Image: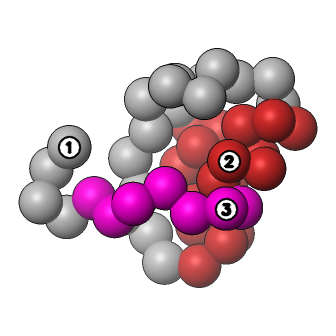
Amino acid sequence: MTPTARPESSHIRLLKLLYGLPATAPYCLYACGCEGDFYILIQRL
């Protein structure tokens, strides 16, 4: 993980479940807030 990445939050785990992503799927969080995290997670699919 890069120094700017932050620990996986509960809503990211929920989104992974919702979209059927494996719990270990790679993701990067550089945006703040749920909507930004959601967008980046979807971009990584």
Determine the residue positioned at 20% across, 43% down.
1
Residue that numbered label 2 is attached to? 13
> Mark 2–mark 3 contact, CB under 8 Å?
yes
x then y, percent, for residue 25: 52, 25
For residue 7, above or below residue 21: below
Q: Amino acid at mark 3?
A: Ser
The earlier-in-sequence mark between 1 and 3 is 1
Residue positioned 64% across, 20% down in the render: 22
Amino acid found under the numbered disc labelled 2: Arg
Precedes in sequence: disc 1 or disc 2? 1
| Quadrant housing residue 37 | bottom right
27 inside magenta stretch: no
Q: Which mark is residue 25?
A: none
> In the depicted view, which residue is nearer to us: 33 or 23?
23
Secondary structure under the numbered disc 1 in the rendered image: loop
The amino acid pointed to by label 1 is Met
**Identity of the residue drawn at 28% across and 59% down:** 5
What secondary structure is found at the residue carrying circle 3? helix
- Residue 29, percent across and down? 41, 57
- Tag 2 secondary structure: helix
Q: Nearer the viewer, residue 11 or 29?
A: 11
Left or right of 36, for residue 2: left
For the residues marked 1 and 3, what is the alpha-carbon distance in whole angstroms?
Answer: 18 Å
Q: Compute the Cα span from label 1 to label 2.
A: 17 Å
Q: Main secondary structure of the magenta part?
A: loop
Seen at 19% across and 64% down, the residue is 4
Judged by depth in the image, the label closer to the viewer, 1 or 3, is: 3
Report which residue position mark 3 lands on.
10
Q: Range of the magenta residues?
A: 5-11
Residue bearing mark 1 = 1
Q: How many marks?
A: 3
Residue 17 sits above or below residue 29 on the image? above
